[in-house]
Amino acid sequence: MSDVKNLAPATLTLDGKTHELPVVEGTERERGVDISGLLRDAGAVTLDPGYGNTGSCLSDITYIDGNKGILRYRGYPIEELAEKCYFVEVAYLLIKGNLPDRAELERWRGLLTEHSMIHEDMRNFFRGFPERAHPMAILSAMVVSLSTFYPELLGEGPEAVEITAARLISKVRTIAAYSCKKAIGEPYVYPRHGLRYCANFLHMMFDSPCADYQPDPVVVKALEKFLILHADHEQNCSTSTVRLVGSSEANLYASISAGVCALWGKLHGGANQAVIEMLEQIHATGGDVEMVVRRAKDKDDPYRLFGFGHRVYKTYDPRARIAKQMSQDVMGRLGIHDPLLDIALQLEKIALEDDYFVSRNLYPNVDFYTGITLRAMGIPTKMYPVMFAIGRLPGWIAQYLEMRNDPARKIGRPRQIYVGPTERHLPPIDEREPAAAAT
Ligand code: ACO
């Protein structure tokens, strides 16, 4: 991380005493005030619930400008990557830092093909889950289980890292497809060596003993794009989880499994499922879009407009722009008309003209239009967060490796401001207040 610049220090006055705080600047001129010595020097911590104003690391993987709607992986704009790359190339870029040349890409593809099977004994695990199990629960459990089957984990040196990353990226795709087959009660389909990454996933999802599946090139291309859009997004909730768990020296599989759980929530990667459920509900109740907008604005109603708003983007999410176009293109090319797309377009129009959303800078995020494309591809709704996880995996791996290779790395351990009772002493049991009265 040699490209960090030191600027003139900031000053903070506390209890009449002035403290100097180092200021650093990154390559895109983002500035950070380094408060790591504040507790030692001034006896105070910073307070930032939700970490909206806290930089947890220096990173050279992904850059976002939330005001301008810019997203770049390793310097390359998301628009170019989504248009011109395969997902596996982008995965390589994120993990290794540079785009692969032809030979490197062939070797990388070879590794992904070689490691696509999961240990046969792991298939027994799937049988133990109830039919209604959410595939994100299965995914998380299976990812951490990989550490018991492949305990060699991350060896030393770039080659071992490459093989571990390929193994994880390849097997997660197989696990994801198996979790879907489990949910619909169909037999598991093994990966095929002749198929590339996305086509192989679709084969495992849709092939069956009674009907051969031929991946449609339109669907394959849409899947490539979908996965690229999700491949990394700097220090979001799930990525920060992966880094935090990994900072205790938990292994890569354990850290990624925790990341899957963090992603599952509907304020994060679970939002793509929530968006479709919301659109389906509007459709089922006669298309009353205004009602949803009214509910989302009502302070006494916890309801939110799913797929809208973002912690970092205060303008249109560049991924949402691509996803919107993609959903229209895919449906046009597959000859599908989905009334949910019409409802989504109407909802977006109403929200973007409404002062509540305008004044709060609430725009569609990546999850608003992606579910519509996944529906057109025939993917069941409960699988949407899993699809997000397959896409995000290279980013999690890259961020985990960056954290583990950082010489300034420390175990993640935020502080707090305690607001509970001051010291008190145990009363005998007969003199204690009932719990309800005490709290
Ligand atoms: N619908 C209605 N109101 C909203 C929404 C929404 N989707 N999002 C934010 N707001 C309102 C809040 O109520 C708040 O209003 P107030 O200032 O009157 O109190 C204001 O906008 C700011 O919102 P915060 O919750 O403070 O914003 P935060 O950065 O903490 O949350 C989040 C971001 C979680 C994404 C939020 O916008 C949200 O819940 N969106 C819906 C869920 C969603 O789509 N999540 C996917 C995000 S993208 C991703 O993770 C891949």
Image: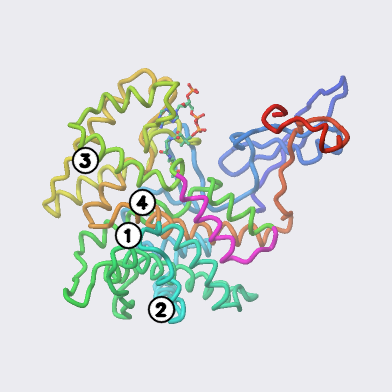
Q: Is tag 3's residue or tag 1's residue first in the polypeptide sequence?
A: 1
Q: Give the x, y percent position of residue 45.
A: 77, 34
Location of mark 1 (residue): 224
Q: CA distance from mark 1 to mark 4?
A: 13 Å
Q: Amino acid at mark 1?
A: Glu
Q: Amino acid at mark 2?
A: Met
Name the outermost residue toward the left.
Answer: 335
Location of mark 3 (residue): 341
Q: Give the x, y percent position of residue 416.
A: 73, 37
Q: Is tag 2's residue or tag 1's residue first in the polypeptide sequence?
A: 2
311 or 184, nearer to the observer: 184
Q: CA distance from mark 3 to mark 1?
A: 21 Å
Position of residue 195 in the picture relative to residue 166 (left or right): left
Helix, strand, or loop for circle 1?
helix
Q: Is tag 1's residue or tag 4's residue first in the polypeptide sequence?
A: 4
Q: Is tag 3's residue or tag 2's residue first in the polypeptide sequence?
A: 2
Q: Amino acid at mark 4?
A: Glu
Would you say the residues marked 4 and 2 are in contact, meaning their CB atoms lie under 8 Å apart?
no
Which numbered disc covers residue 80?
4
Report the residue at 43% width, 48% height from top.
Answer: 269
Name the outermost residue toward the top.
Answer: 355
